[in-house]
Amino acid sequence: MEKKKVSATQKKVAKVMHEFKVGELHVGKSDTIVTNQKQAIAIALSEADELKKSKK
């Protein structure tokens, strides 16, 4: 069985969601911690999109 390749986008989303789960994900540059899972997903996708744009 071959390993599937994990894209940089998937790694970024996984990292952000891990930060959310352990309570370390902050809103922007403030000290406010994200408590809403939907907000965490939006942040993860936004950061992944920025990562994609910076590679082009």
Image (cartoon, helix red, strand yellow):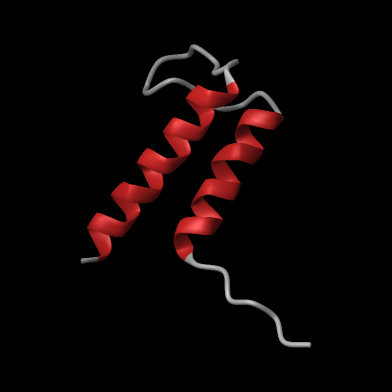
Compared with 30, 25 (above or below) is: below
Is 36 left or right of 49, judged from the image as shown? right
Snapshot quadrant of residue 18? top right
Residue at 50% of width from left, 51% of height from top? Answer: 12
- Give the position of the N terminus as an image quadrant: bottom right
Of residue 45 and residue 25, the one placed in the foreground of this image is 45
Is 6 left or right of 45, judged from the image as shown? right
Residue at 70% of width from left, 81% of height from top? Answer: 3
In this view, the residue farthest toward the right is 1
Pinpoint residue 17: horizontal percent, then vertical percent.
60, 38
- Give the position of the C terminus as an image quadrant: bottom left
Snapshot quadrant of residue 23? top right
Is 25 left or right of 47, judged from the image as shown? right
Residue at 60% of width from left, 48% of height from top? Answer: 14
Of residue 42 and residue 19, the one placed in the foreground of this image is 42
Is 4 left or right of 48, judged from the image as shown? right
Compared with 47, 7 (above or below) is: below
In this view, the residue farthest toward the bottom is 1
Pinpoint residue 32: horizontal percent, then vertical percent.
49, 11
Residue at 69% of width from left, 30% of height from top? Answer: 21
Compared with 41, 33 (above or below) is: above
Pinpoint residue 47: horizontal percent, then vertical percent.
38, 43
